[in-house]
Amino acid sequence: MSATTYEPGTAAATDAVTGLLPARHARSVPAPIPTSRVLGVELRKMFDTRSGFWLMVSIVLLSITATAAVIIFSAREDLTYGTFAAAIGIPMSVVLPMVAILSVTSEWSQRTGLTTFTLVPSRGRVIGAKAALAVAIAAVSMVVALGVGAVGNLVGTAIAGVDPVWDISAREFGQIVLANELVMLVGFTLGVLLRNSAAGIIGYFVWSFVIPGISAALEGVQQWWLDNAAWFELNTATYPLFDGLHLTGQMWAQLAVTTTLWVALPLAVGVWTLLRSEVK
Amino acid sequence: MIIVNDLTKRYGGYTAVDHVSFTAQAGRVTGFLGPNGAGKSTSMRVMVGLTEPTSGSVTVLGRRYADLPNPGREVGVLLDASAQHAGRTGREILTLAARTVGVPKARVDEMLDLVSLTEQEAGRRVRNYSLGMRQRLGIAAALIGGPEVLILDEPANGLDPAGIRWMRDLLRSFADAGGTVLLSSHLLHEIEVIADDLVVIGNGEIVAGGTKEELLATAGTLVRAADTVALGAALSGAGITVHPSGHDALRAEADLARVGHAAFAAGIPLTELRAADGAGLEEIFLELTAATQREGVAA
């Protein structure tokens, strides 16, 4: 804390300015901004805008709708923990990457970077905080999905009059978290690389919906593609994670290669240009 | 104190800022004056580390801006009042700034009070703010950390006359308390009333600088007549050197009496005859703006 003579609530309007201006020798150099504060502010910024608010609302609404749909439409033998957790987890995994994208792109598209990067001149710290929060949110959201899914499983099976089935192992849960982290990081990477909200969101939908569709179509007509797509198409490489399979060494290798291709390399290029770009 | 030392910024072949050097002193308001596109905003972005200079350096309070441990506590910056997230409320924007720099929450209300934004206005989203309200919010955000240096780019834009008056008083008291104020403007008269020191920039280069008194104290006489050409010829004929001043006046390098006699002797009725205080600065400025103005002021 610096040695300002500020007294909250006592100073009249003009005095609030002059009262904060003791002579230079009386001012101590302020302490550096702690990383915890950068993290706290960046987390708040993800959800304090109108778009952030509606993205959160949409997650809740989609989760409730999906859970209700599972209870109403699923066959009794499908009323398992896995089904309920997926009903909440899937809306989250679709919407939260958009939060990650917007957390980066809005600094440019809404031009808030002018304030953000003058208050915290180290852009690496700000972007690092955003990345850490994206990773944390992806993990926490899956734990929430697991918790709410458990409630849904208990309530849903009680309504249907069947015994609850608990069919997610710790390994399977870990794989789902990892898959969600990858999706989140793809969103984050698009944000860092494109630094434009509209382009980022469109890019994310192309990646998560259009590319898998094209890939699936190619797999149907071309044997080579079917055999090798997992080496360069990240969605294909992550399916085993979502499906709860025991991953083979080759599957892990495919995951590593596609992640390097789709996340590590573009993110490195994006961060490199971001740190050098001009903030206008 | 801000020291700008030989600052240059090039974009490919275009030089936006060309070897600019000046100092903004503590306790004084320094006006950074120039037409649109002269390099004011680029210079200011370089000062706060948003743009990397091609060469040269800027120090604020003895350090590079990026090396300040918590810049918001020492330097208040307002570069563009419109550069705020349209979906946030005014209060939220100030809360974020207060948290980042680490000042108590009560400071938000203090600043809202200081810039005369009401409780209700502060709760509205910035999308619905007028430019004047955004400027007030921007000033509040700049002051929230209790800085001793202010860097403001066109802060009077969008303010009504009462708002401009308020801003002037605010910056005056800030400087009188020992603070450093650097503000830019493309309007000579706006900056004339508030600045102690002036730095005039055109096409990326400093064209004039000094205290306001120095720059305004132009030698000579400003003289105006219906027929400027005839007046110019008459004065030249009397051995007086004349310069055009604005589009229908002349500045003569002689005292009032000599100019008046020369015009009288030539039988030219004058419409204005006065000491040319400030005319020199105005000439410099009009010459600078001539290129960008559609009316094409004759220089």
Image: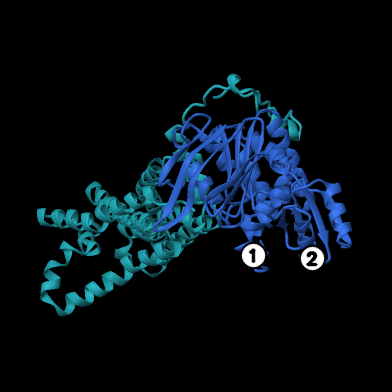
Front residue of this view, candidates B90 and B30 = B30
x and y, in percent, of residue B296 in the image:
65, 67
Element assignment for label 2: helix
Q: Residue at x 31, y 72 (%)?
A: A210
**Mark carried by residue B68:** none
Q: Quadrant of the N terminus of chain B?
A: top right
Please identify the quarter of the rendering in which residue A133 is found. Answer: top left
Residue type for callout 2: Ala
Q: Residue at x 84, y 66 (%)?
A: B226
Q: Is residue A130 above or below residue A187?
A: above
Q: Residues within 10 Å of mark 1 (few under 14, many from 20)?
A: few
x and y, in percent, of residue A270 in the image:
33, 54
Q: Is residue B144 above or below residue A196?
A: above
Chain appearing in cyan on the rendered image: A
Q: What separation in Å lies between label 1 and label 2 (alpha carbons)?
A: 27 Å
Q: In this figure, which residue is indicated by the disc labeled 1?
A: B293
**Chain B drawn in what color?**
blue
Q: In this figure, which residue is indicated by the disc labeled 2?
A: B230
Count of numbered marks:
2
Please identify the quarter of the rendering in which residue B143 is found. Answer: top right
Front residue of this view, candidates A198 and A143 = A198
Q: Is residue A10 left or right of residue B73?
A: right
